[in-house]
Image (cartoon, grey):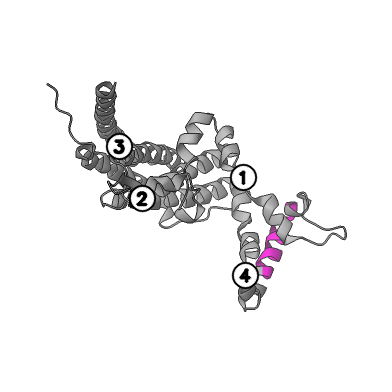
Amino acid sequence: MSLIVPPLAHLPRTREALDQVATLLDLSLEPARRFRKSGTGLENDLRIAVALHGLSALDAARAVHLLSGTGNAGTVPAGYRTICDCLVKIRWMRADPQRARVYLVAEPFERYALASESIKKSPRWPVIIADCKKALEDHPWILKLDGATDTKGKPQYDKIVWALRMPSPEGMAQAVGMDEDDHLLDTGISSLAPHTSVVHTKNFARSLNIDGTINLSTSLDPIMLLWYVSRSTARLGAVTNEVLNVFPDGAVAYKAAEVERDVTKAIMMLKAYMDGLKSVAG
């Protein structure tokens, strides 16, 4: 008789693998600690944009690692989705460094679009306007974008921000070669509760009581928790590879080979366990 251990028995090893990859990404982002602007070329813009998204993925991975070790891991999917979004955006910008420049140039216009009425009445508003004007002086090509100016040639900042924004996650995923199923697995989940559809909120239901009441909880189904942590590890590894392509480091690359062996072993053991569960269920 074979012994089927509880799913959470595999969680410590899976979390350890995620922690190993997060540590590796942290090392690969060392150049971002003291980032030095090297000229004004597109390569410099790409390096900055990749560093920003790499740090975002690292933060999300740490959140997944931390929350997965608690009894309230309901927001783990949000961290996982952030890792996936960062991976897609990094690959999309690496395919054309001009996209990284557009991403960075959009910053003052994003502040313009997001400004509340209280901001517009504060001393910060003139600073935002000045920053937008400076961006146009430094990058006159912005005025050639669709809708960037009115009929009199006056800049329309509210239209410029839309013209500079990235395409939809679906569009970028398709552009970097992710198929429909892959994209659905990675981003077809909610970010956080305020943005969640009523369909996804069913995940809070844990059990039905004899009296007909339902137990609601922010805990995560053990199998789903294992899936999110293991896939976060795989996607974070892909982010790390992208970062190392932009910030090459022989020592980190050597360490990456060691980590890859350990992580692969952990994931293969988890896969064997999942396959075992399927055979028992079948």
Which residue sits at x=65%, y=64%? 112
Mark positioned earlier in the residue sequence (3 or 4): 4
Of labels 2 and 4, earlier in sequence is: 2
- Mark 1 burial class by Cα count in 10 Å: few <14, some 14-19, many 20+: many
| Left or right: 239 in relation to 277 | right
How far is disc 4 from disc 1 in space, using C-alphas? 28 Å
Can the viewer see residue 34 in this picture? yes
Labelled disc at residue 99: 1
Mark number, residue 131 = none
Checking the image for residue 223, the label placed there is 3
What is the quadrant of the N terminus in the image?
top left
For residue 121, what is the image quadrant? Answer: bottom right
Return the disc, 4 or 1, that comes first in the chain's sequence: 1
Find residue 209 and report its horizontal and vertical position in percent: 28, 47
Cα gap from disc 2 to disc 4, whole angstroms: 31 Å
Question: At 27% from the left edge and 24% from the top edge, which residue is drawn?
Answer: 281
Q: Amino acid at mark 2?
A: Gly
Per the picture, the main secondary structure of the magenta-coloured stretch is: helix
